[in-house]
Amino acid sequence: MTIGTDLAELTAGIDALYRAQLTEQSTLNAEGLIPVAVAEVAPRPLRDWSEAHDAIAALLARVPAEAEEAGRVGWLTEMTQSLASLARMFAGERIGFAERLRDQLRVAPEPIPQAILDGYRTELADALDALGYRSGDLAEDVRRWEDDTTVPEAEVIARLAAIQREAQARSRRLVVDIGDDWTEPAGVHDKPYSAYCDYPGRHVWLNLEFRYTEADLKHLATHEAFPGHLVHLARREALVAAGEMPLDGAQVVTNSASSPLFEGIADNGIALLDWIDGPQDIAGLALQRTRSALRCNAAWMVFEEGKSIEEAARAVAGPSFMDVHPMTRRLAFLSHELRAPFLFAYWCGDDAVRRFLDATRDWERPRVVRTLYDEMHTPTTLAAAAA
């Protein structure tokens, strides 16, 4: 517990130091390094980045001896190394994109392979075929299916709330019961996201500049609320308050070793609720994963191949079955220094959790839920937990 408290306080101190040097006001800058903390954490006072680097190195040296008994060596090591890379970047060091993927997000520093994209394409085509979309042109079939299932803008918020209600009931039975806790859907415009879980304010902010199909809304209801971010954060808040989770579990830390699992648990919400009801959900998941993977590849094109965001958007829009303009809007993270690699957190986290669920099919559900919700993991430590 002690080293977890020290990590949380040091992370909060680095967040304060980072925020102090920001000069531009924006939605993403306002989030800082720690957009959400579900418990009070006293930031460690830090005079400058040199003192921060020394404190991180000292903490990392303590991990093997102090974390072994709790089985948290892997988590604390990767999280502290992630923090070290972030602090170096905040201090002005130029760190390459691939290095940031490896050292900050702790994921493979490479684009998503074509073989995986081809697998999604096959799943999508087979599901749409089962739904009666069989023109022989997959792009045309996707367009027709999305047109047929798009929810009118005036009905989107009410429909999202209705889906959340069903997801809430399933989550109570199958994942974690957080009582009547709720996050209210509401519309926004001109934001660098499609949807956002405002945990402190208990809202799901839905960007109405985008169109949403039934499949999109089911994904967002499970991702942002039940059993995704709302349930995950409420569970961590309760565990920290009860002294059953170390204080580092109280923080959401952007672009860190914790990010892939934070997003990956949410992205697997439909599966965690045993809610894959036929080809319409299979098509929705295959399309969502296709687009997520290709957004990763667009980020790689920008930062490793020197393309502009507009060029990358044009390159991946067609294979994503999207127009260029909405794809460009979906790549808004790429213009923000801290968030630039974050698109990989979604796909890599989704993949890590999906693999974990596949590997633990013979586990009892409470054990699966405890591992995902009651422990802090990186993709590496989650894979080890399933071995």
Image (tube, rainbow, N blue to C red):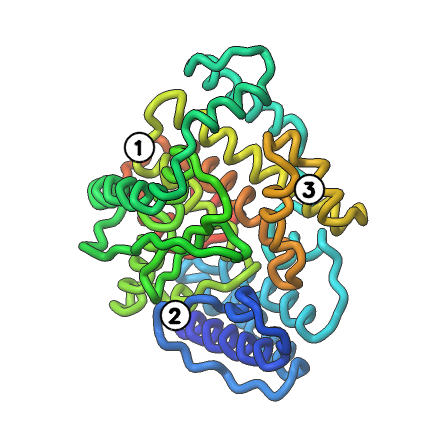
Q: Nearer the viewer, residue 253 or 291?
A: 291
Q: Residues within 10 Å of mark 2 (few under 14, many from 20)?
A: many
Residue 254, x across and y down, in percent? 53, 62
Closer to the eye: label 2 or 3: 3
For the point 53% across and 19% down, the residue is 141
Q: Residue at label 1?
A: 274
Q: Nearer the viewer, residue 308 or 368?
A: 308
Q: Is residue 60 left or right of residue 151?
A: right
Q: Are marks 1 and 2 in contact (CB under 8 Å)?
A: no
In the rendered image, which quarter contains the N terminus?
A: bottom left
For the point 47% across and 27% down, the residue is 147
For the point 46% across and 18% down, the residue is 127
Mark 1–mark 2 distance (CA, rounded to whole Å) = 31 Å
Q: Residue at label 2?
A: 247
What kind of residue is marked 2?
Answer: Leu
Q: Residue at label 3?
A: 313
